[in-house]
Image: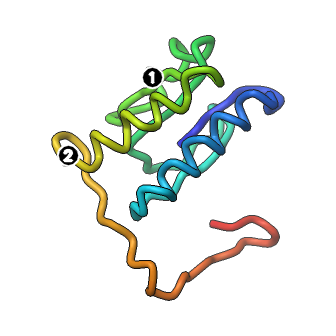
Protein backbone atom coordinates (compact mmCIF):
# COMPACT_ATOMS: atom_id res chain seq x y z
CA UNK A 1 0.00 0.00 0.00
CA UNK A 2 1.49 3.33 -1.08
CA UNK A 3 -0.09 6.17 0.90
CA UNK A 4 -0.23 9.93 0.44
CA UNK A 5 -2.05 12.80 2.10
CA UNK A 6 -3.95 15.66 0.50
CA UNK A 7 -3.43 15.99 -3.23
CA UNK A 8 -1.48 13.22 -4.93
CA UNK A 9 2.01 14.55 -5.73
CA UNK A 10 3.40 13.56 -9.14
CA UNK A 11 6.60 12.30 -7.52
CA UNK A 12 4.58 9.98 -5.28
CA UNK A 13 2.74 8.58 -8.30
CA UNK A 14 6.18 7.69 -9.70
CA UNK A 15 7.01 5.88 -6.42
CA UNK A 16 3.78 3.89 -6.67
CA UNK A 17 4.52 2.90 -10.28
CA UNK A 18 8.07 1.81 -9.38
CA UNK A 19 6.78 -0.51 -6.67
CA UNK A 20 3.98 -1.77 -8.92
CA UNK A 21 6.32 -2.55 -11.83
CA UNK A 22 8.98 -4.13 -9.60
CA UNK A 23 6.46 -6.50 -8.01
CA UNK A 24 5.05 -7.29 -11.45
CA UNK A 25 8.55 -8.07 -12.84
CA UNK A 26 9.17 -10.41 -9.90
CA UNK A 27 5.91 -12.21 -10.80
CA UNK A 28 4.67 -12.15 -7.23
CA UNK A 29 1.00 -12.49 -6.27
CA UNK A 30 1.02 -9.12 -4.55
CA UNK A 31 -1.29 -6.23 -5.26
CA UNK A 32 0.21 -2.76 -4.97
CA UNK A 33 -2.37 -0.08 -4.25
CA UNK A 34 -2.38 3.68 -3.88
CA UNK A 35 -4.61 5.32 -1.26
CA UNK A 36 -4.82 8.42 0.92
CA UNK A 37 -3.32 7.91 4.36
CA UNK A 38 -6.64 9.01 5.82
CA UNK A 39 -8.55 6.28 3.95
CA UNK A 40 -6.43 3.11 4.19
CA UNK A 41 -8.08 -0.29 3.68
CA UNK A 42 -8.62 -2.55 6.67
CA UNK A 43 -5.91 -5.06 5.69
CA UNK A 44 -2.45 -4.49 4.28
CA UNK A 45 1.00 -5.85 5.14
CA UNK A 46 3.33 -3.10 3.96
CA UNK A 47 2.80 0.65 3.99
CA UNK A 48 5.06 2.85 1.86
CA UNK A 49 5.03 6.54 2.79
CA UNK A 50 7.10 9.63 2.01
CA UNK A 51 9.39 10.91 4.81
CA UNK A 52 7.00 13.71 5.78
CA UNK A 53 4.24 11.17 6.60
CA UNK A 54 6.37 8.76 8.65
CA UNK A 55 5.12 10.00 12.04
CA UNK A 56 1.44 10.08 11.01
CA UNK A 57 1.66 6.61 9.43
CA UNK A 58 2.85 4.84 12.59
CA UNK A 59 -0.47 4.71 14.46
CA UNK A 60 -2.42 3.95 11.26
CA UNK A 61 -0.23 1.05 10.13
CA UNK A 62 -1.26 -1.44 12.81
CA UNK A 63 0.98 -4.50 12.40
CA UNK A 64 2.08 -3.53 8.88
CA UNK A 65 5.70 -2.84 8.05
CA UNK A 66 6.31 0.83 7.23
CA UNK A 67 8.76 1.67 4.45
CA UNK A 68 9.82 5.28 3.93
CA UNK A 69 10.67 6.12 0.33
CA UNK A 70 11.27 9.06 -1.96
CA UNK A 71 11.18 9.17 -5.74
CA UNK A 72 14.98 8.94 -5.79
CA UNK A 73 15.33 5.80 -3.66
CA UNK A 74 12.05 4.02 -4.50
CA UNK A 75 13.74 1.65 -6.96
CA UNK A 76 16.28 0.46 -4.41
CA UNK A 77 13.66 0.10 -1.68
CA UNK A 78 11.36 -1.84 -4.02
CA UNK A 79 14.26 -4.14 -4.96
CA UNK A 80 15.02 -4.71 -1.26
CA UNK A 81 11.36 -5.48 -0.58
CA UNK A 82 11.18 -8.02 -3.42
CA UNK A 83 14.38 -9.68 -2.16
CA UNK A 84 12.89 -9.87 1.35
CA UNK A 85 9.63 -11.36 0.02
CA UNK A 86 11.52 -13.92 -2.09
CA UNK A 87 13.61 -14.96 0.94
CA UNK A 88 10.38 -15.44 2.91
CA UNK A 89 11.97 -14.41 6.21
CA UNK A 90 9.31 -12.05 7.57
CA UNK A 91 6.82 -11.75 4.72
CA UNK A 92 5.97 -14.24 2.02
CA UNK A 93 4.12 -14.14 -1.30
CA UNK A 94 3.48 -16.82 -3.86
CA UNK A 95 4.68 -16.53 -7.42
CA UNK A 96 1.97 -15.60 -9.88
CA UNK A 97 1.01 -18.18 -12.49
CA UNK A 98 1.39 -16.40 -15.85
CA UNK A 99 -1.03 -18.84 -17.51
CA UNK A 100 -3.77 -18.40 -14.90
CA UNK A 101 -6.75 -16.28 -15.90
CA UNK A 102 -6.80 -12.81 -14.41
CA UNK A 103 -9.92 -12.11 -12.37
CA UNK A 104 -10.63 -8.42 -11.89
CA UNK A 105 -13.37 -6.93 -9.73
CA UNK A 106 -14.65 -3.41 -10.30
CA UNK A 107 -16.71 -1.01 -8.24
CA UNK A 108 -17.81 1.57 -10.77
CA UNK A 109 -14.62 2.60 -12.59
CA UNK A 110 -12.33 1.55 -9.72
CA UNK A 111 -10.52 -1.79 -9.91
CA UNK A 112 -10.68 -3.53 -6.53
7 lies above or below 46: above
Name the spot of residue 3 as percent of width and height, x first: 61, 34
User: Which residue is under mark 1?
Assistant: 59
106 lies above or below 20: below
Identify the colour scheme used: rainbow
Label ID, residue 43: none
Q: Do the residues labelled 1 and 2 touch (CB within 8 Å)?
A: no
Q: Does dot 1 land on a helix, a strand or a loop?
A: helix
Report the residue at 71% width, 36% height from top.
14
User: Which residue is under mark 2?
Assistant: 87
Name the spot of residue 100 as percent of width and height, x first: 44, 86
Q: Is residue 73 left or right of residue 13?
A: left
Residue 26 falls in which quadrant of the image?
bottom left
Report the residue at 29% width, 47% height from top.
85
Q: Nearer the viewer, residue 53 or 68?
A: 68
- Taking the view exactly as shown, the residue that stands out farthest to the left is 89
Q: Does dot 2 land on a helix, a strand or a loop?
A: helix
Location of the C terminus (image quadrant): bottom right
Say whether disc 1 or disc 2 marks the residue closer to the N-terminus.
1
Q: Distance between the residues labelled 1 and 2?
A: 28 Å
Residue 95 falls in which quadrant of the image?
bottom left
Name the spot of residue 22 as percent of width and height, x first: 51, 48
Count of all numbered marks drawn on residues in the image: 2
Report the residue at 83% width, 29% height from top.
7
Q: Residues within 10 Å of mark 1 (few under 14, many from 20)?
A: few
Report the residue at 71% width, 30% height from top.
12
105 lies above or below 44: below
Q: Residues within 10 Å of mark 2 (few under 14, many from 20)?
A: few
Q: Is residue 31 left or right of residue 27?
A: right
Name the spot of residue 83 as percent of width and height, x first: 31, 41
Q: Which of 49 and 70 is in front in this view?
A: 70
Amino acid sequence: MCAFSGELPTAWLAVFHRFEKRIERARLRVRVRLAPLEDLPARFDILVVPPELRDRAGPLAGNATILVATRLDAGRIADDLVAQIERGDEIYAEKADPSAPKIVTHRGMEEL
